[in-house]
Image (tube, rainbow, N blue to C red):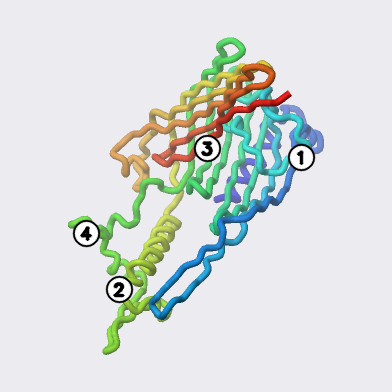
Amino acid sequence: MKKIILSILLLLAFSVDAQESKFDFKKELKKTFKFSTFYAAVNGETSISDQNVYSVLNDLETDIIETPFDYTLTLGVRKIQRFGYENKAKSFKDGTETSYSDGATIGRTKGFEFLFELDYKRQQGENYIDQHHFLRYLADKWVVKVEYLQDGFADVEYMEASQRYRHKLGKRVSLTAGTVQRISEPYGFDPLAEWVLSNGNLHYTGLALEEGYTIGFDPTGIEYMAPDGTVVATNTQIWEEVVIPQVLDDYVQSEKDALPVQWCHSVVIGADYYYYTKKIWLHSWANILPYHLNTGGEYSYHNFNGGNWIDYSGGLIFGYKINKNLGVFIEGKYNKYWNREWHDFKLGINYIIL
């Protein structure tokens, strides 16, 4: 699915800004990537310090838990005009920048903009992938956008396409309304639900046996064996506290991977506001998806939450230079789709000693 998505995005990148006249590939390629920035960077830092773990089961024993260093490998290309408050002085783009304005519906100027960024990360010993790709075309009366997001840390992944009518109120406010189509895994589906007993407990032993695990008894005790015959536990405590959690995690992941992706068709309403001077600036945006078409699919989110629901997202960037020495700022964004939340923010105060 990811290859298909990236192919669609790249195809749109070369076609959305093309003219009706005969297509000139070299001309359109140069026009598409003019003023864009390609970047690749590796960033690393020390992770959490080593920890000593003590045991007295067989006299005093000490183990050391080591966490490998954190790193991020970033590959990307972007063509997004900066807003007035964004830093223009930085010599190189190193992939660690947080550009909250990328989440806004309305860009700085009319025309075609895009972002393709892929991050391979290791944080506190956990490896995951973050991806954010989008294509956006902004006109006076409309805006279209195709976006793919994978946030490995928040465990959310989806592709979204939106088509909106745009109504401007002066130079600062844009109101938008239209439709959104999203493709994602079947959020809300719980593979463990069928293993819950009438008393509310999970029949995890039955699930493990169905997954190929076996339990053996002999005069010396009990053995729990994996599907390949390997002994994974010799007492109930290890079985329940170590093995079963892994069994459940593997089962849930395999069941979700086996299901088809789900389409979600929604109505979207949005508002963007942008004001900037060298002393004060305010950039904010909000989107609400109040209605979602029920297509009747077996794994539709409608089936897991009792009907319709509300999704929304928004962002705020505010800065104020109180005087030539003192300034305050706040920046952040928040998203909630399918009852899954991911957000980040920063705020602070700057005082320059002259």
First reached walking from the N terminus: tag 3 or tag 2: 2
Element type where label 4 sits in the image: loop
Between the residue at mark 2 and the residue at mark 4, the CA separation in whole angstroms equals 20 Å
Between the residue at mark 4 and the residue at mark 1, the CA separation in whole angstroms equals 58 Å
Between the residue at mark 3 and the residue at mark 2, the CA separation in whole angstroms equals 41 Å
Marks 3 and 2 in Cβ contact (< 8 Å): no
Q: Amino acid at mark 3?
A: Asp
Marks 2 and 1 in Cβ contact (< 8 Å): no
First reached walking from the N terminus: tag 2 or tag 1: 1
* Mark closer to the observer (4, 1): 1
Q: Amino acid at mark 4?
A: Leu
Q: Amino acid at mark 1?
A: Phe
Q: Residue 191, labelled with which disc?
A: none
Count of marks placed on residues? 4
First reached walking from the N terminus: tag 3 or tag 1: 1
Viewer-closest of 2 and 132: 132
Task: Indicate the quadrant containing the C terminus: top left, top right, bottom left or bottom right.
Answer: top right
First reached walking from the N terminus: tag 4 or tag 3: 4
Q: Residue 344, labelled with which disc?
A: 3
Residue at screen point 62% across, 31% down: 136
Is residue 326 positioned above or below 339 on the image? above
Which residue position holds label 4?
197
Residue at screen point 63% across, 55% down: 46
Q: Give the residue at the far top of this rendering.
A: 170
Which residue position holds label 1?
92
Between the residue at mark 4 and the residue at mark 3, the CA separation in whole angstroms equals 39 Å
Between the residue at mark 3 and the residue at mark 1, the CA separation in whole angstroms equals 24 Å
